[in-house]
Image (spheres, helix red, strand yellow):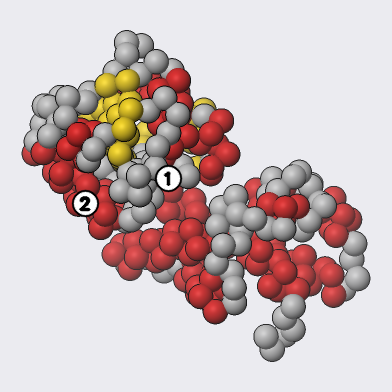
Amino acid sequence: MQSLTIGFIGLGNMGAPMAANLAKAGHKVRGFDVAGTTAAGVEVAPDIAGAAKGADVVITMLPNGSILRQVAAQAIEHMAKGSLFIDCSTVDVESARNTSEAAEKAGVLAVDAPVSGGIGGASAGTLTFMAGGSEAAFAKAAPLFDIMGQKAVHCGDAGAGQAAKICNNMILGVTMIATCEAFALADKLGLDRQKMFDVVSTSSGYSWSMNAYCPAPGVGPNAPSDNDYKPGFAAELMLKDLGLSQQAAEMADADTPMGELARALYAQFVENEDGKGMDFSAMLPRFEKRGREG
């Protein structure tokens, strides 16, 4: 692949290593972040316009849909026709579609491509991208996804990437709560946690939350539970994603009672129970402390 000029806006915990991997692969990367953060091998741009001007591709990794809309409007204004705008943030479907429409009006290709894999995946270049946009836009983005990740799935038209991410993380939030509840119940029934894992991880109750990211310390593969629940995926980020799932459900008139209950439980955990700054699997010690009546 020929060397591209890439503007990267949003050099946080996820964006910085993603930008660094693109630079390491030989692309000229200009980065900008309002917090002044930088990334290895990435040239510092003075502002959004400086990152976007003359870029073949502009990539964003931002906190929410409102900020995406503002940043995209400024960046697209300075992008050439036929260039590519990739948003890797996790935002609401409407903001993703709005950004795609703005790009299309300017003759710019657009892909919404939220990621799965966390900070570790961003650093290692093993992220999974869930992409929405035209076939042409996805084809142009695919070689960059190959550098930053290990898999990219073209999910459909604009907004489809966000829809896939939101649905995936609603399942993740619900299954993690169920896994934590089950361990807390097993404790009170006198069942050894390792025996619990040995049974469930090879039976019909197995899930990613149990098998790959077990919330019980010392059980299963190494996970944040083995590091005092320091976040691999923070509880407040799970709360954000569950909020997006319920916003989407309301928009689509979909009945998602488990998703709504998971959102409410994570809201209580983050806002009222010191869950902020903890991994989302820290729901297990939360349930351990509680009885039937809370």
Give the percent coordinates (x, y) of residue 119: 54, 42
Residue 141 vs 26, above or below: the answer is below
Residue 105 shows up from this direction = yes
- Element type at mark 2: helix
Residue 184 vs 163, above or below: the answer is below
Q: Residue at x 50, y 54 (%)?
A: 169
Residue 173 shows up from this direction = no
Give the percent coordinates (x, y) of residue 249: 36, 64
Q: Residues within 10 Å of mark 1 (few under 14, many from 20)?
A: many
User: Position of 158 compared to 174: left or right?
Assistant: left
Q: Residues within 10 Å of mark 2 (few under 14, many from 20)?
A: some
Give the percent coordinates (x, y) of residue 40: 45, 29
Q: Residue furthest bottom?
A: 293
Picture disc at residue 69: 2
Picture disc at residue 78: none
Q: Residue at x 53, y 44 (%)?
A: 118
- Element type at mark 1: loop
Residue 63 vs 133, above or below: the answer is below
Q: Residue at x 43, y 18 (%)?
A: 25
Q: Residue at x 11, y 27 (%)?
A: 81
Question: Mark 1 sits on what residue?
Answer: 12
Q: In front: mark 1 or mark 2?
A: 1
Q: Nearer the viewer, residue 134 or 20?
A: 20
